[in-house]
Each structure stands twice: as structure tokens, then as C-alpha cells.
Amino acid sequence: MVGMRAAGSYRKLSFWHDTVPGSLEPGDPLPGDVEADVAIAGAGYTGLWTAYYLACANPDLKIVVCEREIAGFGASGRNGGWCSALFPASLGKLERMAGTDAAIAMYRAMQATVDEVGRVAAAEGIDCHWAKGGTVQLARSQVQLERAREEVAEARKFGFGEEDLRLLPAAQARELASAADVVGGTFTPHCAAIHPGRLVRGLAGVVRARGVSLFERSPVVQISPGRLVTATGTVRARYVIRATEGYTALLPGQRRAIAPVYSLMISTAPLPETAWAEIGLAGRPTFSDLRHLIIYGQRTADGRLAFGGRGAPYHLGSAVRPSFDRVPAVFDALRRTLAELFPVLGEVEVTHGWGGPIGVPRDWCASAGLDCATGLGWAGGYVGDGVATTNLAGRTLADLITGNDSEITRLPWVGHRSPRWEPEPLRWLAANAGLRTMSWADRQEARTGQPSRAAAVMGRFLGA
Ligand SMILES: Cc1cc2nc3c(=O)[nH]c(=O)nc-3n(C[C@H](O)[C@H](O)[C@H](O)COP(=O)(O)OP(=O)(O)OC[C@H]3O[C@@H](n4cnc5c(N)ncnc54)[C@H](O)[C@@H]3O)c2cc1C
């Protein structure tokens, strides 16, 4: 188990932690042994949404959440703020797993979930800088444009129309985000840009106000049927939920369940209006392009660019350490990529650089479930698409626990069990080979102008 951070250092975790209102002083740890109906390990979005919907469904339930650091310490406080309808498994993959109707139902449920996050934030007075401006995905080469066409064709095959995803001619794409070399793109309205720290910290306050006991600086050392064990006490509960995502491998018996893969981000100083006039992003659509090694960005409410990407290495043994959050070479690469996209940025100051672990299951398919015999439940494996998906997970777990046989409990990810990752060093080889192949494929495509088959082959090998 990794050690805890110094209590005063949480502001430095990310731009979002630095700018979230209110104190980041940790609350009390679990004071000793307690009885509860539901015990939850982890106070990111998954743990907090689960607690929220349970408390809404039955205010009499005694719900205890134990968080190793502070609420929002993990990916939920550090992400790119895309509250999107993206789901890590493709429609085609879900179709193979569960049939066409189930695949479509999953994607429709994700679209509705984006609005559900916005609804609750507004209803509960959480000002998370919500702006539902959609997502513009830029095609910056003919190869990328072809990929955009394929994505739209795939959506149409499953009955998703222009109102869900549409191909953009170059002029329209540039109007939304005036990046260099744009030859087209896609647009979906199903995404909101948010300040993720405000959402997660706001949610923590809301669940506390609804009577949930949220203990911070309370590392869970073991989860077993009816028991959630911490250093300072044990919570005995009929239901015990694991909501530890990128940190799951640190729990006993979970080493091969979910691989922590790092995503890193930078944010700029506020940009002058003249720069925004050139860049666009009016209405704050989130943006990316169609390269293999994912990049993602948003215009923040205070006029900065927050921009991230994968590319940091996976660490042997699913290790998670504070030093992995900061890789100067990756920050430099992000800075260069941003300047390539928007040359008007010139030498703009980068004020923050940070990162965190996302949770990657072996088959790249997120899941949420509850074993009724043992009372053990879980949700996670969202890869880089957890901001909205965690809300669906929270509602699903609440329905499963309260026995509410709703439509969402029949979605194909419910009860899905991903295979375990290979033992080391195979896991290290596979994960890093995947990351290297994606960036190599991007370089090769830029050089030759031809699509690289390597990325697709590697994606299939990894089960993505
Ligand atoms: C840099 C970055 C950018 C991202 N961008 C996006 C994006 O734009 N859109 C999107 O949809 N997704 C994005 N993601 C992914 C998304 O943030 C996550 O999928 C989501 O936040 C997962 O929420 P969670 O609650 O399951 O996990 P986390 O937020 O990681 O929460 C897990 C919590 O459990 C706690 N914990 C761990 N182990 C223990 C233990 N033993 N005992 C007690 N507590 C424990 C941790 O401290 C942590 O607070 C991004 C992730 C990163 C890192």
C-alpha cells in the first residue's frame, strides 16, 4: 500500500484542485468499528454517485464511505472534464458481447447520463462550470478524415443519426476549433465541459448533507463479504462496494484486475480575447483529433486551455506513485502538440502540469455489478471515459442494492467480468507495447499519408 500524502499538499495535485473553492483539509478518519448497510471504498465519482443515489432512494440507509486521501483525490479530481457519452467498449464489441439491441441501449443510456449529471449538478447547486457544447473531433490529414467517415458510418449502422454524430466539412470544423491543417471532422452534441474538481468536491458535500458518513485519510486494507477493513476500524455491512478504479491493483487479491495507465495534462495561463477570437471554441465544445494516441482538450470557464493525452508509461507491477503523475517529457510533448494545433498560442505560459491513473481492464470494457450471494459490488474499468459513466454506475449499483429492477440494471456492462491481466512481466510488455505502437502508428501515418494497420492489429491483440 502506498503511503498517504502530506495533508497540506492536495492543492498541488492539479489545476482543478488548485482552483476548486473551499477547503481541501481532510475530514475525520474512520473512528473505530461501525455497523452500516452499505460500505464503499473510494470517494471518487463512482463511490460518491453510488452513495448519492442510495441516499436518495432510501434516506434511512446507513452508508459509510472510506477514502484513503480526500474525496476527489484520484482521477475524478484530475480529469479533462469531458462529461461525455463515450463508453470504452465500441458498439461493435458490445454487439458481439450482448447483441445489437443491448449495444444500442448502452450507448443511449450513456447519452441520457450526460444530461443526468447536468440535472443533478443544477438541482443540488453544484457549480461545476457546466457547458454542454458537444465535442468536435478534428481530422488533420486525409487518413484521419477517412477514420472520421468510418466512425460516422459505424454510428449510422446502429441507427445513430446526424443528431448524434455528424461529419463536418473543413470550414465547419474550423469554425468550431480553428486548428492548423484541419480538413474536416466530426461533431457530437453529447458532451459537456466541466470543472471536474468542482463536481467531485460538490458531490462530496451533497452526500454528507444527505447523511452519508464520509471518512477521509482512511485507507481500506481489505475488502471481504460483510467487511471493509481500514487501519483504524472495520465497517461491517451487508453490501461492500469497491470504487477504487486506478488504485484497485493495490488491494489484496486485485493485482491483476485493473491496470493503472497514466494520462497527463497541462493547462495554460488565461488566453487573451484576441487568441480566443482566432481559436474559437465558443460555447466550449471539448476537442480532440483523430490520431491513435488520444489527446483531449477543453476551454475552461476562466479562459485557459486544459489539454491532455496518454503516452506516459505503464509501470511494472501496476505500481502507482505520486512521481508518476509528473513526467516532464510528456508535458513538453503536450505543450508542443498544443502549439501545433493552435500556432496563435506562441510561447504561452503553461501554469500547471499533472496526471493520474486511469483504470484499464484486460478487455477494455467497463463494468458495474453486485454479487447478491456475497454482497460484494464493484464498478470501474472506465479507461479514459469515466466522468459520465460513473454516474450510470452509481445509479446502477443503487438499483441493484435496493432491488429496483430498472432498465439500467439490464444493460450489457452490468455483471460483466473482464478477464484478469497477464502476470508480470507480460502485463508490462503488453501495456507498453500498446502505447508505443499507437504513437509509432501516428508518426508513420504523418510520414506516409497512409493508414497504419499496426494500431488496429495491436488494438485487437489488447482486446480494445
Ligand atoms: C488525467 C486524466 C484525464 C481524464 N479525462 C477524462 C475525461 O475528460 N472524461 C472522462 O470521461 N474521463 C476522464 N478520465 C477518467 C475519469 O476521470 C475516471 O474514469 C473517473 O474519474 C473514475 O472515477 P472513480 O471514482 O471510479 O475513480 P477515482 O476518481 O480514481 O477514485 C478512486 C478513489 O479511491 C481512493 N482509494 C483508492 N484505493 C483506496 C483504498 N485502498 N482505500 C480507500 N480509498 C482508496 C482513491 O484515493 C480515489 O479517491 C481522466 C482521467 C485522468 C487521470
Image (tube, rainbow, N blue to C red):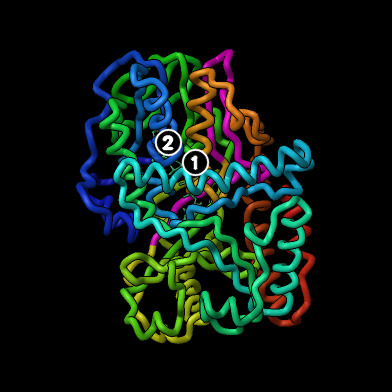
Bounds of the magenta segment: 354-380
What secondary structure is marked by label 2? helix
Image mark for residue 93? none
Q: What residue type is disc 1 on?
A: Thr
Residue 412 against residue 351 in the figure, above or below: above
As for residue 79 lying within the magenta part, the answer is no
**Where does residue 180 sit, x and y in percent of width and height?**
56, 84
What secondary structure is marked by label 1? helix
As for residue 377 lying within the magenta part, the answer is yes
Q: Residues within 10 Å of mark 1 (few under 14, many from 20)?
A: many
Residue 234 visible in the displayed image: no
**Where does residue 327 sit, x and y in percent of width and height?**
44, 64
Image quadrant assignment for residue 331 = bottom left
Q: What residue type is disc 2 on?
A: Trp
Q: Nearer the viewer, residue 346 or 156?
A: 156
**Where does residue 441 sit, x and y in percent of width and height?**
70, 70
**Where does residue 188 sit, x and y in percent of width and height?**
59, 61
| Quadrant in which ligand 1 is drawn | top left
**Which residue is disc 2 drawn over?**
49
